[in-house]
Image: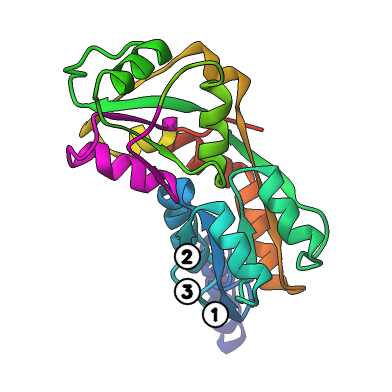
Amino acid sequence: MRARALVAVLLTLTGCSAAQPAAEPSTTGLTGELTVFAAASLQDAFDDLGAEFAEQNPGVTVQPTTYDGSATLATQLTGGASADVFASADTQTMSTVTDAGLAVGPATVFTTNTLEIVVAAGNPLGIDSLADLAALSTSGGKVVLCGVQVPCGSAAHEVLDGLALTPVSEEQNVKAVLTKVQTGDADAGLVYRTDVLSAGGAVDGVPFPEAATAVNEYPIVALEDGAVAQAFVDLVLSDAGQRVLAAAGFSAP
């Protein structure tokens, strides 16, 4: 009698075990810190990716990402600043870091971006083309660009080649250009499509066909030979990472 009862209990426990499988481990086992340097235009997407990485890897302390113009970040890195991962807004600036021997392996292009004319919401000045932007500049309007030393400025000067346009200022990163138009300190400027989207209706973006001649390719590379740095690079390159980038307005490489 007791034997039959014991068998019944064991069968019951076995059934419970089959119906409720063990939960997957909540951690990848990675530990350490992650410090990322990234182009200013990546801020919204990389903030989301950083949060996702921290959730997937609770043993890793994810430091706030440092955002700025790619050239500024490259100068800091070659000058001795410490980071685990670098994501640039163009391949030329990335070469400054890789040629200095700071990278672990080759950089990988993970997304692309294109310029748009950014204007006040509703486009009150009726800017519809690069020619209109140049005319605004020569008639006393306030147009701002990125400095030529940063990727957004290099692309801007490429698409403006042959047009007479004198900006009232040249900024060290694309977010500074966007801010000047948002606050009314400038009438228009050239920023990336993603920056227009990030403003959430506070500004309007005007696409122009010449932007296709100066598409920015964004490379990423690990600067530290470790699992944490590579895991973040892998996340950015993954399908999940690409979905986050697409939602921010970036295009596939």
As drawn, the label of residue 200 is none
Residue at 54% over, 41% down: 148
Residue at 61% over, 50% down: 88
The residue labelled by disc 1 is 59
| Residue 164 picture location, percent across and down | 45, 19
Q: Which residues are magenta?
A: 166-193
Magenta stretch contains residue 206: no
Q: What's the residue type where badge 1 is placed?
A: Gly
Closest to the camera, between mark 1 and mark 3, is: 3
The residue labelled by disc 3 is 63
Residue 113 visible from this viewpoint: no
CA separation in Å, label 1 and label 3: 13 Å
Secondary structure beneath dot 2 equals loop
Question: Looking at the figure, which quarter contains the C terminus?
Answer: top right
Going by the image, does 195 lie left or right of 126? Answer: right
Q: What's the residue type where badge 3 is placed?
A: Gln
| Residue 85 picture location, percent across and down | 64, 64
> Label 1 neighbourhood size at 10 Å, few (<14), some (14-19), many (20+)?
some
CA separation in Å, label 3 and label 2: 6 Å
As drawn, the label of residue 65 is 2
CA separation in Å, label 2 and label 1: 18 Å
Q: Can you tell which quarter of the image residue 104 is in?
A: bottom right
Secondary structure beneath dot 1 equals loop
